[in-house]
Amino acid sequence: MATLKEKRTCGQRCEDFGRFVWNSDTGTMFGRTPEKWVYISLYYVAFYVIMTGLFSLAIWTLMYTLDPYTPDYQDRLTSPGVMVWPPTYIEEDVVLSYNMSDKASQRKMSNCLSNFLKPYNDTSQQSNCNCTRGEYFKQEKFEAPHHTKYSCRFTQSMLGRCSGLDDPMFGYNGTMPCVIIKMNRIINFLPNNGTGMAPHLNCTILSGHDNIDMIEYFPTNGTFDLSYFPYYGKLAQPTYVNPLVAVKFHLVKEREAKIQCRVVAHNIAYQDSYEPYQGKVVFLLKALK
């Protein structure tokens, strides 16, 4: 019959642990001699030094092969998105609603446009150059200062009656409000694939046809001039600004309409139901009294 294991006291357990930490009979510390501890420490130091070196080499190789000015892979849309200002959203819909009798409502819309157009004033655009209209502004080399490329000038005054220079309220104190349409940037994108025709904006009334008497575009014909393409990226063109098109709507009767503004170009898609802002933007324009 097996004998029961002798129960050890707390003092005996402490004595055993102390002997494990340092055993004077065998000269071991934590079960190994100091010499073996030195060998193990050197091994792990060498191991982690080599692993750190390999990791650093892999990161350096990756960064060396990347072009800081142009992404190797772009998972963005092949067609640019389109946005409208003032950007007032109700859930997922864009609703531009203001009250002609409420100055606070008018200022909210006009201030939004004024802040948006600050980079387009003459002072901010002074460093950009006047480009040849109707032609792509292709730049193979970094000839601008600080190893950058030149950007074309787009001034606030090019938006005509919707520039806010003559009418700081942008028409929101009456029935002729202005909206500004911006096409998002895609690096190296050339609209129309070199056909020579600049993309232009076309706004159609989806509902409330009788409530809009006239639509005006600024610049003329709502054109996004070819000289603003291609875009080479923020690092290459730090002073680049998006070309804009302003639209002034003349509201009548019930002063409410649902509008679609689409950028018309050969290679800009707009019918993808999964990308509602690809190539177009739909919004509700409403003037309350």
Image (cartoon, rainbow, N blue to C red):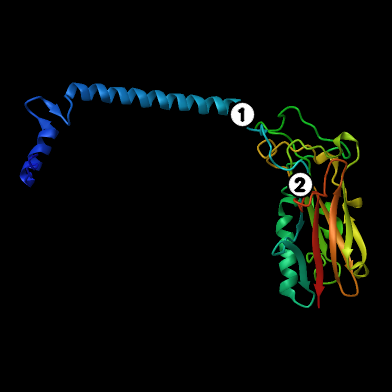
Q: Disc 1 marks which residue?
A: 66
> Mark 2 belongs to which amino acid?
Asn
In the rendered view of the protein, which quadrant contains the C terminus? bottom right
Residue type, mark 1 in image: Leu
Mark closer to the observer (2, 1): 1
In this picture, residue 254 sits left or right of residue 276: right
Give the answer, above or below, for where 59 lies relative to 190. above
x then y, percent, for residue 31: 17, 29
Query: In front: 238, or 7?
Result: 7
> Foreground residue, 271 or 280?
271
- The part of the image, by quadrant, that contains residue 229 is top right
Q: Is residue 96 left or right of residue 48?
A: right
- Taking the image as drawn, is residue 164 in sight? no
Pointers 2 and 1 in contact (CB under 8 A)? no
State the quadrant of the N terminus.
top left
- Residue 137 is at least partly visible in this image: yes
Where is residue 218 drawn, in percent x and y? 87, 54
Total marks shown come to 2
Up the image or down, 132 lies above or below 114; here it is: above
Point out the residue furthest to the front here.
Answer: 1
Q: How many angstroms separate mark 2 from mark 1 (CA)?
A: 26 Å
Tag 2's secondary structure?
loop
Q: What secondary structure is found at the residue carrying circle 1? A: loop
Say which residue label 2 marks.
242
Give the quadrant of residue 230: top right
| Chain-order first, disc 2 or disc 1 | 1
Residue 240, x across and y down, in percent: 73, 42
The residue located at (8%, 43%) in the rendering is: 4
Q: Residues within 10 Å of mark 1 (few under 14, many from 20)?
A: few
Question: Could you say which quadrant of the image residue 147 lies in?
Answer: top right
* Residue 164 image position (x, y, % from top left): 79, 61
Q: Is residue 19 above or below residue 101?
A: above
